[in-house]
Amino acid sequence: MIIVLVPLLPLVAALAALIPAKPMIARGATLAAALVALGIALWTAQKVAISGAWTPLPNWVGADALSALLLLLQAVLAVTAALYSWGYIAREAEGDERRERRYYLDLNLFVTSLFLVPIMLQPALTWVAVELTTLLSVFLVGFNRSAEGLEAAWKYAILTIMGATVAVLGILLLLFGLHGASPAAPATWAALVAKAARMSPNLLRLAFVLVLVGFGTKVGLFPLHTWLPDAHSQAPSPVCALLSGVEVSTVLYVILRLMPVWTAIPHFPVRDWMLAFGLLSVGAAAFLLLQVHDFKRMLAYSTVEHMGIIVTAVGFSSAGAYAGLYQMVTHGLAKSLAFYAAGAVLLIYRSRSISDVRGLLRTSPFAAAMLLAAALAIAGVPPFAVFLSEFSVLRSGLLAGDGWIVGLLALFIAIAFIGVMLQVGRMVFSEGTPPEVSDRRRLPGSVVLATSLSLLPVLALGLYTPPLLHRLLTLATIAINR
Amino acid sequence: MHISLLYGLNALAAALFLMTVFLFLASRQTAASLNLFVRQALLLSASALLQAFALHSLDLLLVAVITVVAKAVIIPWMLRRSLGGSFQSRREVELAVSVPTSLVIAIGASLVAYFVAQPVAAQTQGFVAVNLPVGLAGLLISVYALAVRHQALPQFLSLLMLDNAAFFAGIAIASTSALWEIVAALEGIIVTIIVALLTRTISERIGTTHVGALAGLREEGPR
């Protein structure tokens, strides 16, 4: 039952944020809850790696390798986001303690909803949790209350709720099919997968389209991505790290969990659908990356690119699923690092415009080094972890015999690389520092610590894959390819 | 009550449900749009009630009651209470596409929904065969309505109509889980609270709920 504590801990921290006291209580409770949740997630992952699955509350709450992998990634990012927020939000709130406490309330509720998604064993309840991730993060996106922030929050709310409503019909159709195939079966993910072959193909095809379009909107797949660059650039940086690093992957998890159901549809090219959506997303994001003017939007478009890479990988073959899941992990870690570095730059320059950031290397060598490292990491340069996962994706495509798709994917990744490095190069190596930034060079200690800590796994996973991670990836790949 | 009569009454409710979607698309006043949403929620509830009688399902009866309370009473009350000014009579809804063109597109969407749902509906009997295509048509038309409205409140009402459409199909295809419907109804109330708060914040901060005019965040391009 200890797994139930994972979403409950941030909920308790959210209650602590309601106490009208110094924000220190909310900060400390948020960090403590995230650390304990990480410990439980790690313990769950080890338990699942040994036994394959763990269901303390049968048909309601539990975890298999796929959910344990996502839970672990969420928990890692929840810790770094809590640590980063400590100093970052204190500076952003400018002494407004009520506003700071409000931030921690919203942040913890959002993290609670994220944690709920992978541990729910019923698709309908998972859908509710996915919907809650939107509802509980809307005010985080509009936290700065500027016209742009509120515009982003509005687009985010309307488009992703629309997507979830479309997806719910797909989920209900699946449950209807399950009831028809086996009236006594519980309405769980496992039962859906087990009975998929006995369901009506027509029904499954319609459900697939509704789920892919509905949840694809929230994943940010092209052409349904339009809200993502706005929301992921306007939110405070630690929230951006969570939105881009894990929220989109959390929704993608639902699509991936249903892969065995989709592949059970006879004569239905489900992998071709995935390849088409994935490749279009990577291509569109790559070209948009060449034209961005805002460095946080640049990182958001990079998220669209990476989601496209994961979906393409899953479309390749059974081996592609391993690479895609690995990409999900490495992207989450690298993107959080990138948003933390971008947040540091934003604290110094008070502008998201690439052209306003001049002479970053002279102004703040730490922020410059971290931004450069993050850019190299998300662009897939060795020895960073994303290089290894992207290489695995391309390799799995070649093994699947999809040579021309691999060629196109490699081309788009190369264009995205040029886009990211050109923009970051301008910010880091250009001459001339605006005089007004000199007072803001000193970054809060928690920002420096959280950003530095985030760099470690991005580097380490590029050189070494821990046995626990490899085991979870292998088991999760089996679950997707069942 | 004879089962064929219940089927017939449900088909009538479905036809009226689809008509409310068309009327919503043609409506040019926010207050009238909200009234249409309430009527549509009542028709959704009526369909659940008829299915509850036909299938002797206490779950569906509960769904019918929850739908009326949540969608025909609580949500409109919350919207009027928090955004009263936006419901001033005669306030015009701005549309990106003219009403006649939109109605033609809606007819096309209905035909698409019918043909897409037909293979599934043909394998089922009774309520699913009616509710699925009508719900799907409502879904497509509501997405279109959302896309062509510029102001916050009409956009949100389109989203609520979309929710009704999904659940019009949903009550027929997943008629066995009251827990699920209760959660979904509560979720609808949370959505309303959050979007109403957001709309009010936008109105207070920017002085308008014309979200279509907010264009600070543009797509990338040469400067």
Image (cartoon, rainbow, N blue to C red):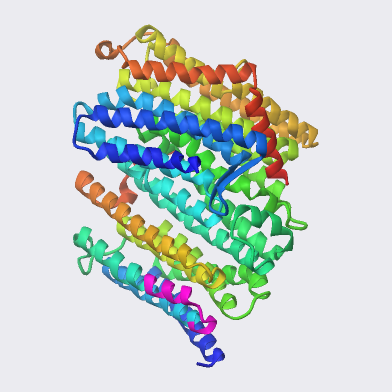
Reply above or below: A435 against A416.
above
Toward the viewer: A326 or A422? A326
Residue A224 pos. (x, y %): 51, 47
Tell me: A476 left or right of A446: right
Main SS category, magenta section: helix
Q: Which residues are magenta?
A: B53-67
Is residue A294 visible in the rendered structure shown here? no
Does the stretch in magenta take in A259? no
Tell me: A296 left or right of A302: left
Does the stretch in magenta take in B60? yes
Residue ranking furthest to the top? A362
Residue A220 pos. (x, y %): 51, 42
The number of discs equals: 0
Toward the viewer: B24 or A96? A96
Residue at the (36%, 35%) spot, across then down: A234
Residue at the (51%, 83%) spot, across then down: B11
Residue at the (63%, 70%) spot, across then down: B115
Reply above or below: A374 against A6.
above
Reply above or below: A76 against A120.
above
Toward the viewer: A23 or A168? A23
Is residue B57 visible in the rendered structure shown here? yes
